[in-house]
């Protein structure tokens, strides 16, 4: 709290609002039988800025579990990256599904 003393002796107290960190959202990749593993790795590297080894680990997790996390971002960034991934997959003729969900707090 900030305190300020006026000339007449009154003390004014002002409460500072607490700033909350923005909530985080996960971009999920969903496995399908058509999208190539090479394309998924390329997408993770180019859109989600993952290294080759990290992209490969994520791709294999998606392949084995059916879904995997491409990354966690603020909502706008997550939605933008998911949409960019969908556009690139569609351009290449792949039905890759990318979704966005809120992280548990």
Image (spheres, rainbow, N blue to C red):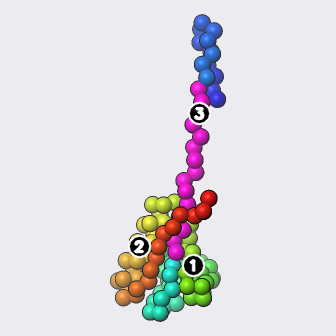
Location of residue 55 by image quarter: bottom right
The answer to whether residue 66 of the structure is visible from this angle is yes
Q: Residue furthest front?
A: 104
- Using the numbered discs, state the Cα–Cα distance from disc 1 to disc 2 in whole angstroms: 17 Å
Residue occupying image coordinates x 60% and y 30%: 15
Is residue 49 in view?
Answer: no
Q: Is residue 21 magenta?
A: yes
Q: Residue at x 59, y 40 (%)?
A: 18
The residue beneath circle 3 is 16
- For mark 2, give the secondary structure: helix
Q: Position of residue 62 (x, y in %)?
A: 57, 84
Q: Which residue is mark 1?
A: 68
Image quarter hosting the N terminus: top right
Range covered by the magenta-colored residues: 14-28
Tell me if mark 1 has few (under 14), some (14-19) or many (20+) residues whose alpha carbon lies within 10 angstroms of its own.
many
* Residue on which disc 2 sits: 84
CA–CA distance in space, label 3 to label 2: 39 Å
Q: Indicate the position of residue 53 as horizontal and vertical percent values.
A: 63, 82
Question: Quick one: 32 or 91, which is closer to the camera?
Answer: 32
Question: In the displayed structure, would residue 96 be above or below residue 14?
Answer: below
Marks 2 and 3: in contact by CB < 8 Å?
no
**On-image quarter of the C terminus:** bottom right
The mark that comes first in sequence, 3 or 2, is: 3
Single out the mark in the foreground, 3 or 2: 3
> Quick one: label 3 or label 1, which is nearer the N terminus?
3
Image-quadrant location for residue 7: top right
Say what secondary structure mark 1 lies in: strand
In the depicted structure, whether residue 82 falls above or below residue 53: above
Mark 3 secondary-structure assignment: loop
């Amino acid at each position: 709290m900030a305190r300020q003393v006026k000339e007449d002796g009154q003390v004014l107290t002002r409460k500072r609002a607490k700033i909350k960190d923005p909530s985080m959202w996960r971009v999920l990749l969903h496995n399908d039988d058509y999208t190539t593993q090479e394309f998924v790795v390329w997408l993770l590297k180019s859109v989600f800025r993952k290294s080759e080894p990290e992209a490969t680990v994520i791709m294999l997790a998606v392949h084995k579990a059916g879904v995997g996390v491409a990354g966690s971002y603020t909502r706008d960034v997550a939605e933008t990256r998911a949409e960019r991934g969908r556009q690139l997959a569609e351009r290449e003729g792949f039905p890759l599904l990318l979704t966005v969900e809120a992280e548990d707090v």
